[in-house]
């Protein structure tokens, strides 16, 4: 049974930083592209970035590029989302996802497994 468990969310002030973690089990972690998505109340789930199977490359949307960085530790079956210079508009539930398709896709339907999400609130 595949499980993705996010942690590290919370309340942070604008301009602050936060690191989210996603621990995977039940799958061959290094065979999966890992992505991060987020969903704000009343909005569709949106792509926040993804990283290749070995973590040597990543892609990000314009909304987070230069502020968010994804890293992974295949020995620990864990992927991280490092978020800096946080803005109130970054407030959302953040999800990690695993794709066996091989590409660092922004499309939700190309991800096979999802975590339950962790809340990030950026507010003063």
Image (cartoon, rainbow, N blue to C red):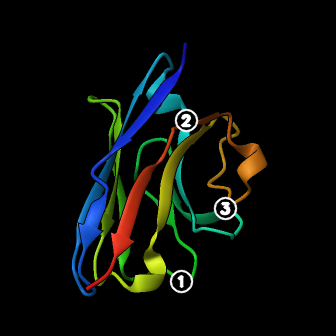
Q: Are marks 1 and 2 in contact (CB under 8 Å)?
A: no
Residue under the point 28% across and 77% down: 84
Label 3 sits on residue? 45
Label 2 sits on residue? 32
Cα–Cα span, label 1 and label 2: 24 Å
Q: Between disc 1 and disc 2, whose residue precedes?
A: 2
Task: Locate the N terminus by quadrant.
Answer: top right
Q: How many marks?
A: 3
Label 1 sits on residue? 63
Residue under the point 48% across and 16% down: 26
Cα–Cα span, label 3 and label 1: 14 Å
Looking at the rendering, which quadrant does residue 111 occupy? top right
Residue under the point 54% across and 51% down: 35
Q: Is residue 3 above or below residue 106?
A: above
Image mark for residue 106:
none
Q: Is residue 44 above or below residue 76?
A: below
Q: Between disc 3 and disc 2, whose residue precedes?
A: 2
- Badge 1 element: loop
Q: Between disc 3 and disc 1, whose residue precedes?
A: 3
Of tags 3 and 2, which is closer to the observer? 3
- Percent coordinates x, y for residue 30 in the rendering: 45, 31
- Percent coordinates x, y for residue 40 in the rendering: 57, 68
- Percent coordinates x, y for residue 122 in the rendering: 34, 77
Q: Is residue 119 left or right of residue 41?
A: left
């Amino acid at each position: 049974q595949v499980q993705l468990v996010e942690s590290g969310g919370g309340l942070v002030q604008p301009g602050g930083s936060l690191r989210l973690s996603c621990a995977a089990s039940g799958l061959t972690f290094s065979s999966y592209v890992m992505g991060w998505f987020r969903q704000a109340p009343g909005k569709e789930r949106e792509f926040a970035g993804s990283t290749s199977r070995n973590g040597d490359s990543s892609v990000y949307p314009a909304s987070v590029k230069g502020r968010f960085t994804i890293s992974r530790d295949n020995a620990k079956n864990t992927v991280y989302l490092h978020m800096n210079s946080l803005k109130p508009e970054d407030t959302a539930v953040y999800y990690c996802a695993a794709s066996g398709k091989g590409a660092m896709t922004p499309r939700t339907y190309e991800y096979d497994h999802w975590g339950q999400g962790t809340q990030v609130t950026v507010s003063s």
